[in-house]
């Protein structure tokens, strides 16, 4: 089958044997390119596994599913508490990042990874369920409520998903973005340029500059939600943070909250409010054009936000 990986700074379209072994076979429909993929590619490390962790597809009987790309043990104290995203077992895998992922025609995953979808959901956007779940988890762990005012810093795909999830929760939400096309993508969520202060400020950039902006926008005793994968040290402006008694909440993937799995909540949001995400996916490519797709994803001036590989559409 055809598949995609990246290693030593190069994107490769490869022919590889179809997956075998225990688990559930999924025929992949589409798979998104994530900012983490771009970071790993540009880091030029050795990553020989099949890429892709934002994926959806169909079971052999035609059932449409998304995939929660965490292969956890289920038996450690973290898993038993619902925090399986923090699984302490050495065999824990992040599918598509540390083991074979969904940029392929097929994948086999543990049954617990399946996210059963309403069969009326748009299959061309269901790969967004994973990045939306990233935002949902950040709101869950900070006990964000519909009466909270939310500002999102960063207009990339995770920032767009953070805007969408806040809007779906009923929050007032604004967006601090670098590019005009990022503001336009969030227009159906009625975002504006942030003004005043906010109960929650979501960092979707992970830089010293973005965190300075977060602190400025935060109301006293507000919470900063860190969704960005910061590869360097996180530097929070000390004086500004102390003066506001700010708190920073690092958020990793998704898990099981008081209202169920974050990724199931994400799937329902996408089904209930499909029009709000209609501009997040800006580019689509067949799997044979993965090299070009990654180039577009790495160039924000191209107008890209979420670039998707369509595989078995």
Image (tube, rainbow, N blue to C red):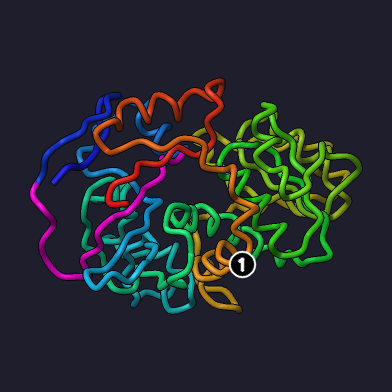
| Crowdedness near tag 1: few (<14), some (14–19) or many (≥20) residues, C-alpha within 10 Å | few
Q: On the picture, is 155 further left or further right than 312?
A: right
Q: What residue is rendered at 8% in x and 49% in y?
A: 17
Q: Position of residue 179 (x, y in %)?
A: 67, 26
Q: Viewer-proximal residue, 44 or 60?
A: 60
Q: Position of residue 181 (x, y in %)?
A: 65, 30
Q: Position of residue 43 (x, y in %)?
A: 37, 27
**Quick check: is 110 in the magenta stretch?**
no
Residue most extreme to the right:
196
- 19 to 210, vertically: above or below: below
Q: On the picture, is 175 further left or further right than 106?
A: right
Location of residue 78 (image quadrant): bottom left
Residue most extreme to the left:
17
Q: Viewer-proximal residue, 298 or 60?
A: 60
Q: On the picture, is 107 further left or further right than 117?
A: left
Badge 1 is on which residue?
272
- 20 to 201, vertically: above or below: below
Instruction: Report how many numbered discs are placed on residues in the image.
Output: 1
Q: What residue is rendered at 22% in x and 57% in y?
A: 107
Q: What residue is rendered at 56% in x and 61% in y?
A: 270
Q: Position of residue 282 (x, y in %)?
A: 52, 36
The magenta stretch spans which residues? 17-34
Location of residue 47 (image quadrant): top left
Q: What residue is rendered at 77% in x and 46% in y?
A: 151
Helix or strand or loop: what does disc 1 sit on?
Answer: helix
């Amino acid at each position: 089958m055809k598949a995609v990986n990246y290693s030593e700074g190069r994107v490769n379209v490869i022919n590889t044997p179809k997956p075998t072994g225990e688990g559930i076979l999924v025929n992949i429909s589409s798979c998104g390119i994530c900012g983490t993929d771009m970071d790993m590619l540009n880091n030029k490390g050795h990553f020989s596994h099949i890429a892709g962790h934002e994926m959806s597809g169909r079971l052999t009987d035609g059932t449409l599913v998304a995939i929660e790309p965490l292969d956890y043990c289920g038996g450690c104290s973290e898993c038993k508490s619902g925090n399986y995203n923090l699984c302490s077992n050495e065999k824990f895998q992040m599918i598509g990042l540390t083991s074979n992922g969904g940029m392929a025609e097929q994948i086999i995953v543990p049954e617990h990874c399946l996210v059963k979808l309403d069969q009326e959901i748009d299959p061309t956007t269901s790969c967004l369920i994973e990045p939306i779940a990233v935002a949902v988890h950040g709101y869950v762990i900070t006990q964000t409520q519909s009466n909270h005012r939310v500002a999102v810093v960063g207009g990339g795909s995770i920032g767009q998903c953070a805007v969408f999830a806040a809007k779906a929760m009923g929050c007032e939400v604004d967006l601090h973005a670098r590019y005009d096309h990022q503001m336009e993508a969030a227009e159906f969520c009625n975002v504006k340029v942030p003004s005043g202060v906010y109960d929650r400020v979501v960092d979707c950039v992970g830089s010293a500059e973005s965190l300075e902006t977060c602190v400025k926008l935060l109301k006293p005793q507000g919470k900063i939600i860190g969704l960005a994968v910061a590869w360097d040290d996180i530097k929070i402006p000390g004086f500004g943070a102390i003066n506001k008694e700010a708190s920073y909440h690092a958020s990793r993937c998704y898990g099981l909250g008081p209202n169920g799995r974050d990724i199931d909540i994400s799937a329902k949001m996408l089904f209930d409010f499909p029009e709000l995400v209609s501009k997040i996916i800006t580019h689509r490519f067949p799997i044979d054009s993965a090299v070009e797709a990654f180039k577009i994803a790495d160039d924000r001036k191209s107008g890209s936000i979420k670039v998707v590989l369509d595989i078995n559409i």
